[in-house]
Amino acid sequence: MTRPPAGPLGSAAPSVADDAPVFVISVAAELAGMHAQTLRQYDRLGLVSPGRTPGGGRRYSPRDVALLREVQRLSQEDGVNLAGIKRIIELESQVEALQGRVHELLEELQHSENRRMAAEAAVPAVYRADLVPHRRQSSALVVWRPGGAR
């Protein structure tokens, strides 16, 4: 097992958040294996949106650098044009957001189930015989389209 490099006074070096804007454009370009002008173009096109300093300078995060590498891979290895890459990035972002929402809903469902079980356990034993169990049926997904669109 390797240890992180020591910082001042022998402490471990502070870790950088994946989305912390820390790299100037020249460093980010070198890390991504691109020219700085390419990063400026990708910023104008909305493919990668780096953070900004109060003076307007771009600051790239480790996540931005990874995204730049992915843009380069999709372009060079898979032959995807920039419009296609932008759409892929948008869709991946949507999937990530939806996965987060599903996780939140599952936690909420578990919390509700725990509350239900606690409420059921709080019912005195003499009344439990009067409780009617609710049987779960298989669920179905219904899609509603307004305006009668089919």
Image (spheres, rainbow, N blue to C red):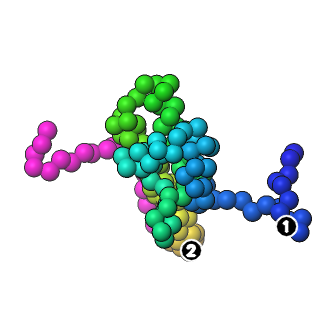
Q: In the image, is 92 to the left or to the right of 117?
A: left
Q: In the image, is 118 to the left or to the right of 55?
A: right
Nearer the camera: disc 2 or disc 1: 1
Residue 14 falls in image quadrant: bottom right
* Residue 122: numbered disc: 2
Q: Which residue is mark 1?
A: 8
Distance of mark 2 from mark 1, alpha carbons? 56 Å
Determine the residue positioned at 56% across, 45% down.
29
Q: Is residue 136 magenta?
A: yes
Image: 30 above or below 52: above
Residue 93 position within the rendered picture, expressed as x and y whole percent measured from the top left: 43, 48
Q: Quadrant of the N terminus?
A: top right
Q: Is residue 134 magenta?
A: yes
Residue 77 position within the rendered picture, expressed as x and y whole percent measured from the top left: 50, 24
Image: 71 above or below 54: above
Residue closer to the observer: 124 or 56: 56
Q: Mark 2: which amino acid?
A: Ala
Q: Which residues are magenta?
A: 128-150
Residue 84 seen in the figure: yes
Q: Mark 1: which amino acid?
A: Pro
Q: Secondary structure at mark 2?
A: helix
